[in-house]
């Protein structure tokens, strides 16, 4: 029973997104017209608990899409598709 609970907990925790945090991070990096699209499954490392898909206009004026990954004790990372 403990193994089932542990596996379920990892799935729930691994499926977290942070739209507000991703928006703040992207805005600070110079992105505009930011839209978040929920959790980015299989887009981040195991140590990164939050992943949020996004589309935006990059600092160069070109449209981009990707995911913002964030761990509990580390900063955010922007990854592009």
Image (cartoon, helix red, strand yellow):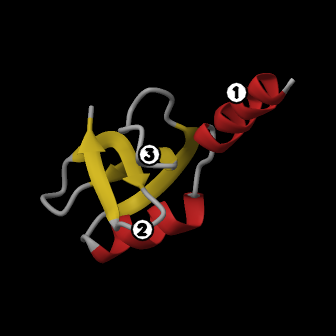
Q: Residue at x 65, y 36 (%)?
A: 10
Q: Residue furthest right?
A: 1
- The picture quadrant where one finds residue 26 is bottom left
Which of the 4 quarters of the picture holds residue 6?
top right
Q: Nearer the viewer, mark 3 or mark 2?
A: 2
Of 80 and 71, nearer the camera is 71
Residue indicated by mark 1: 7
Q: CA distance from mark 1 to mark 2?
A: 22 Å
Tell whether label 1 touches label 3 (CB within 8 Å): no
Residue 80, position in %: x, y? 25, 40
Residue underneath mark 2: 73
Label 3, label 2: how many angstroms apart (C-alpha)?
Answer: 22 Å
Q: CA distance from mark 3 to mark 1?
A: 28 Å
Q: Which residue is mark 3?
A: 54
Q: In the visual, does 59 lie left or right of 51?
A: left
- Residue 39: x and y in percent read 57, 39
Where residue 58 sits in the image (x, y, percent)? 23, 56
Q: Is residue 61 above or below residue 30?
A: above
Q: Residues within 10 Å of mark 3 (few under 14, many from 20)?
A: many
- Residue at 39%, 51% in the rendered image: 68
Name the residue furthest bottom.
Answer: 28
Residue 20, placed above or below residue 19: below
């Amino acid at each position: 029973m403990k193994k089932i609970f542990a596996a379920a907990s990892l799935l729930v925790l691994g499926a977290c997104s942070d739209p507000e945090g991703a928006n703040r991070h992207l805005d600070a990096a110079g992105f505009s017209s930011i839209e978040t699209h929920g959790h980015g499954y299989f887009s981040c490392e195991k140590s990164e608990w939050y992943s949020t898909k996004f589309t935006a206009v990059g600092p160069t004026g070109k449209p981009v899409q990707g995911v913002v990954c964030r761990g509990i004790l580390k900063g955010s990372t922007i990854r592009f598709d």
